[in-house]
Image: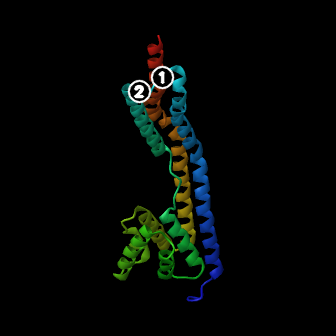
Amino acid sequence: HSKTGCDGATLLDESAARIERRLSLERSGATATAGARLSGRIVAGLPLAIVPLLPAVGASLVDRRGALLLVCGAALLLAGAAWIGRLAPRPLGVDDAADIARLLAAAFDAGLDASQGVALCARSVTKAARVHLDGCGRAVALGLSWGSAFARSTDAGLRELGAVVVRAERLGTPASAALRAFAEVRRREREDEFERAARRAPVLMVLPLTTCILPAYVLLAVGPILRGLSSTS
């Protein structure tokens, strides 16, 4: 604001909104995946809870066969827990293309031109997005408009953003409104995809449960118990 004389209130509002969006993503992502992760860890830990009770039935895990059962069962538990962890959906991160679109829209509303708006974005977005913006800046230096430079970017999100800017330029509509609509569409698409992944995760966890956790339960609990009963009889 002090350098360009733009509307600083508009940029401050967008900065506050960006902070709130990131906090909301972290909270919603952690809440959505907490149940699946906790269930997987509880189920994976049940066989280990039985191990301290085995001496009560005469089962031993200190001899050669018992140690083999313990090692194999523990390996299956670790593999199952890692598998379950990979199946749980990761919380949504920042969408660089949508973030740039909102920042550009705020910059345009504040009275900045495209070059100043992109410079503002370059100081605020992630390192990966900054690399793509630098590439677009080199294309603009060669004579392309920012919309065309975005449309030629190697990043898929920036290419979609470029198509929106070029379309707004051709139609003569305000670019800020088109950019905000673009960011909102991407937000909804990513949230829908995350919700589908969160609903699919418990179903997919049946695979590690049946192929790793249940065999580990047999090796760590049923096997030693049967050995203890056979030795006492």
Please state which of residues 166 and 113 is positioned toward the viewer in this rendering: 113
Q: Which mark is residue 59?
A: 1
Q: Which residue is drawn at 65% across and 73% down?
A: 13
Residue 19, picture quadrant: bottom right
Check the image and report above or below for 213 versus 36: above
Task: Give, as a three-letter code, the residue at label 2.
Answer: Gly
Which amino acid, mark 1?
A: Ala
From the viewer's perspective, tell me whether residue 36 is left or right of residue 223.
Answer: right
Identify the residue shown where x is 37% and y is 30%: 68
Report the side of 58 relative to 134 (left or right).
right
What is the image's colouring? rainbow
The residue drawn where x is 39% and y is 71% is 131
Image x and y of residue 120, in percent: 51, 78
Q: Under tag 1, what secondary structure?
A: loop
> Compared to 212, does 59 lie above or below?
above
Estimate how packed mark 1 is, as few (under 14), some (14 to 19) or many (20 or more) residues with alpha carbons within 10 Å: many
Mark closest to the chain's N terminus, 2 or 1:
1
Residue most extreme to the left: 142
Quarter holding the N terminus is: bottom right
Residue tagged by mark 2?
66
Q: In which quarter of the image is residue 75?
A: top left
Residue found farthest to the top: 233
Q: Are marks 2 and 1 in contact (CB under 8 Å)?
A: yes
Drawn side of residue 167 relative to residue 17, left or right: left
Q: Nearer the viewer, residue 186 or 47?
A: 47
| Percent x, y of residue 64 | 36, 27
Q: Where is residue 160 in the image (x, y as percent from the top left)?
A: 44, 63
Residue 69 in view of the camera: yes
